[in-house]
Amino acid sequence: MSEKVIITGGSGRLGRAVVQGFATAGHEVISLDRELPEDPVSGVDYQIIDLMDAGTTHAEFKKISPQAVVSLAAMAVPFMAPEEVLLKTNTTIAHNVTSAAVEAGATRVILASSPSIMGYGSPGGWVPEKLPLDESQTPRPWHAYGLSKYVAEQIAAMFAAKMGPEGQVKFASFRPCFVIAQEEWSGAPTQQGHTVLERLKDPKLSAPALFNYVDARDVADFLLLLLQRFDRVENGSVFFVGAKDALATRPLAEIIPQIYPELATLSSTLTGDSPAFSIDKARRVIGWEPQRSWRSELQAKL
Ligand SMILES: NC(=O)c1ccc[n+]([C@@H]2O[C@H](COP(=O)([O-])OP(=O)(O)OC[C@H]3O[C@@H](n4cnc5c(N)ncnc54)[C@H](O)[C@@H]3O)[C@@H](O)[C@H]2O)c1
């Protein structure tokens, strides 16, 4: 069924694939971003907006009157701005978009969070309750980016609580693993500047993200399915969205202890190509399965 969907951040690394996926699926897509994309998708309505401005955001959402909203706009990298700027920007955008979506009559709202809210890489040390990480574990963010994404999840949960379980509007957040856009499989730099091949060859490059990754097109497929199957989702839920394997050439049970000795016991279950992030909830609740792996997509030879 074709719907009118606002996608915020539609010009970004992930947004471009989500806009493409939704347009291909037949939805009427309105992308709201501060910038236009280099390569616009035909048929998509691209609007320039600063989502930090509550008045403009509410007015634009009312004008569009979307049925659903997927919000990706954010400062997407830890420490890319002073901590107070990052915190303020991402939480303000999350609140402006969610409240504007509700006021404009949208029935489903999805916010982008991040796996980094779990707290790995903290200079203060980090040992999780268990590995692989799943949605039952308590986030322990250690930087403003992680905190801002944790707050974004809580904003979705706050609106869900306000509506109650039978409310007319449904909310969810998702934590995409390290996003690989399609062109990055053939050598374009990833978000951190390295190529995928370099990340695979040098485990130290992928270790800060605990070897997680996901193809941007698989995220688009997840979001399309979530919109369709919201009736199966507890209001305010959170999902990890990652590849079915780790971005590593050896089992994490071997690599992780070499880099993080304190995780040796917990990582011993991560044998074969198992990732450190569980996507079982997304599989179980909405029946999503990622279709792409570095093993099938990488163009260069290892
Ligand atoms: N890329 C990843 O690996 C990754 C991992 C985890 C979570 N995420 C989250 O997914 C989302 C998308 O990430 P991305 O990699 O595509 O980021 P990106 O930086 O490529 O895209 C973000 C987009 O948001 C827009 N934007 C920022 N501030 C805005 C504002 N005030 N008003 C309007 N638009 C604004 C930017 O112009 C940009 O196009 C973000 O919320 C990010 O935190 C990304």
Image (tube, grey):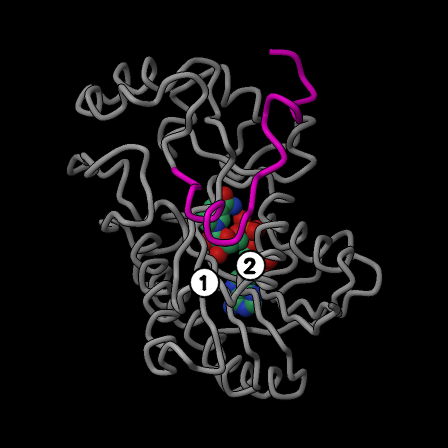
Q: Is residue 101 magenta?
A: no
Q: Is 301 situated left or right of 267 in this image?
A: right
Q: Cα distance, mark 2 to mark 1?
A: 8 Å
Q: Amino acid at mark 1?
A: Val
Q: Quadrant of the N terminus?
A: bottom right
Mark 2 residue CB less than 8 A from any atom of ligand 1: no
* Front in this rendered view, residue 232 or 67: 232
Residue, x 54% and y 41% (percent of image)? 179
Secondary structure at badge 1 equals loop
> Which amino acid, by three-letter code, is at mark 2?
Leu
Q: Position of residue 238 (x, y in %)?
A: 39, 57
Vertical side of 89 occupied by 220: above or below: above
Q: For the magenta stretch, what is the residue range? A: 278-302
Magenta residue check for 294 = yes
Residue 146: x and y, percent? 32, 52
| In this picture, residue 178 sits left or right of residue 29 | left
Name the residue at the right extreme.
42
Q: From the image, tell me which residue sits under label 2.
A: 226
Mark number displayed over residue 198: none
Residue 233 — which label? 1
Instruction: Decide: few, some or many residues near mark 2? Use Cα within 10 Å; few <14, some 14-19, many ≥20.
Output: many
Of the pair 46 and 100, the residue shown nearer to us: 100
Q: Relative to 159, say whether 258 is above or below.
A: above
The answer to whether the residue labelled 2 contacts the one labelled 1, judged by CB atoms less than 8 Å apart, is yes
Up the image or down, 182 lies above or below 112; here it is above
The residue depicted at 37 percent of the width and 58 percent of the height is 149
Query: Residue 295 placed where, x, y %?
Result: 60, 21
